[in-house]
Image (cartoon, rainbow, N blue to C red):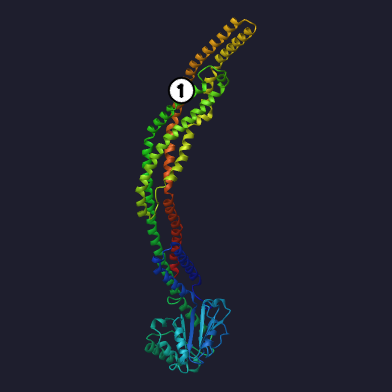
Amino acid sequence: MELRRAHRSIEGLVRHWTESAVVLCRFIDDDEQLEQYFAPVQQALQALDHDRRIIVIGGARCGKSELLSRLVGVPVIASATPLKHYTCWRYCCRDGDVTQSRFIATPSLAGLELVDTSDCGQEETRKICHSLMQGADVLLAVIHASSPMDSPVWKLLEQMPEESLSGCILIVTHAELIEAHEALNLKETLREQCRTRLHCVLPMFMLPAEAGVAEIEGIRTLVQDILQGEHGVKRTIKTLEERALELVEKQSRILRARESVSRTDSGFLAGIDREIDNFHVRQISGIEEHRRNLDAVLKGVIPELIGEVRRLCGHVFSPVVLLRLELLGNAVDRVFHSLALTALNNHQKESDAVFCNSCASHWRSVRPRMKINLSCEIGEFPEEELEKQITVVRNRFCNSLYEPFDTGAMRQRLSLLFVSQAEWMNAFFAFFCSFLILGGILGALGQDAVGLTCVFFSLVLWGIGSLKLYFARKKVCSGIEAIIRDFCEEMDQNMPSLLERFVTSRLSAYRELYSVPREKVARQEALLRPLKKQREIIHLQLRALLPHL
């Protein structure tokens, strides 16, 4: 059996999960509530950090150094010099103090500190030993068999509180100097001495100078039991775990409180969304009236469009009108598109202004509630920002209404309406030109009367053509009006769905203004989820380690 620090694996696990809990505190970021739980954990970690101390005390030349050498199986341990009063034998230095340290290259001793003291009969050494004994896990009190009652260890042991003597072992060396029957009497005498002076009975070993392996193994086993017992490393680890569990439980209470607040915040925002949804329902319920208004707006541009058509067609018969007949259909299409778009935009601007006023009123009612419930100042109503977004929505809506213009169906009907007048115009223009030219030729040949008659007849034809143009223009205007009304009726079938999308998009633009508080609550929820999960893992791991302690 090797002497080693006990519970190395369980200590590492407890330390790992405790440090994870400490790291979690930084993310929870609530020093005020966690401080009283955090400090004990730090103290318990510090208590676990130092090497477990095995200290041997006794008078001069009683075999202290030899006992340590036999105990750890390393024969290089030398006696402590009187000038230094004590020597710490270690595998590595964990606390940075190397003034009294010596090192043994035995990995099994990692985490142990073997303290060899000089003669504790000296006043200065006794003071130093007393301070060293305060942090000792195992205390080996060595007494020379020749003078057991006069050993200076008794004075030191008397100064120790009774609970601190649980890790003390009394060892009588040079037992070969007394007879076997005297050894029994000596043991009983020493037990009585313990009862009288220490109020307890210490475990005792009698060691001759040439002690066997079995005798040393008995001491080593007892030392190992003390190190890993309830009053040794096990107690320190268990204390650390208990403190860590208290810290994790406090973290759980804080996270549950924050989760409750987050749920309240989410519920509050859900209430705001429900208010906007109710607003949306009211807007949807007014779609039918909105549709009728838009239909009236579209039909309201017809008189202005007809006036523009009359201007384009002219008031008298002219070859110019004939030459541009094929272009008039596209021109009227563009004019109608421009007039209708302007009229609808003006109408929608009025509707959007009413909508913005309603949003501003709702915003003013939400702002104080937001400040109280979420501690979030949303500021004054961002009218300009909302208007910009609504303008984009309005333009997209108006453009969606006139997709039929892009398909060309309406444009083709208008073009056919104008081109259908080309036949009679061509005939009138041909006769007009023929009589005018014939009159000119006859006049040049001296037939003035006949020539004038031809010219007069051509002028009559021009007047008849202008009159015919007047009636044709009325017919064209009636046809255009019929086409526009057909177009409005056809588009009226798709209007409800387009209006519903428009109203929904407009409400979405207003809902987007609450993105800042919504993002704040979302961040809180996003931060809480991994913290809760990590806390649950730490708690489960620490609880799983309890049975091992």
Could you tell me which secondary element the residue under label 1 belongs to?
Answer: helix
Give the number of callouts: 1
Q: Position of residue 516 (x, y in %)?
A: 43, 51
Q: Residue at horizontal 43%, vertical 40%?
A: 506
Q: Position of residue 393 (x, y in %)?
A: 46, 39
Residue 532 visible here: yes
* Quadrant that contains the C terminus: bottom left
Q: Position of residue 400 (x, y in %)?
A: 48, 34
- Residue 2 sits in quarter: bottom right
Q: Residue at horizontal 47%, vertical 34%?
A: 398
The amino acid marked with disc number 1 is Glu
Q: Residue at horizontal 44%, vertical 56%?
A: 529
**Above or below, 146 relative to 42:** below
Q: Nearer the viewer, residue 62 or 407?
A: 407
Q: Position of residue 284 (x, y in %)?
A: 38, 37
- Residue 148 sits in quarter: bottom left
Residue placed furthest toward the right? 445
**Above or below, 60 relative to 214:** below
Q: Nearer the viewer, residue 372 or 385?
A: 385
Q: Which residue is mark 1?
A: 481
**Above or below, 425 relative to 334:** above
Label 1 crowd bin: few (<14), some (14–19), many (20+), radius 10 Å? some
**Above or below, 480 relative to 117:** above
Residue 277 visible here: no
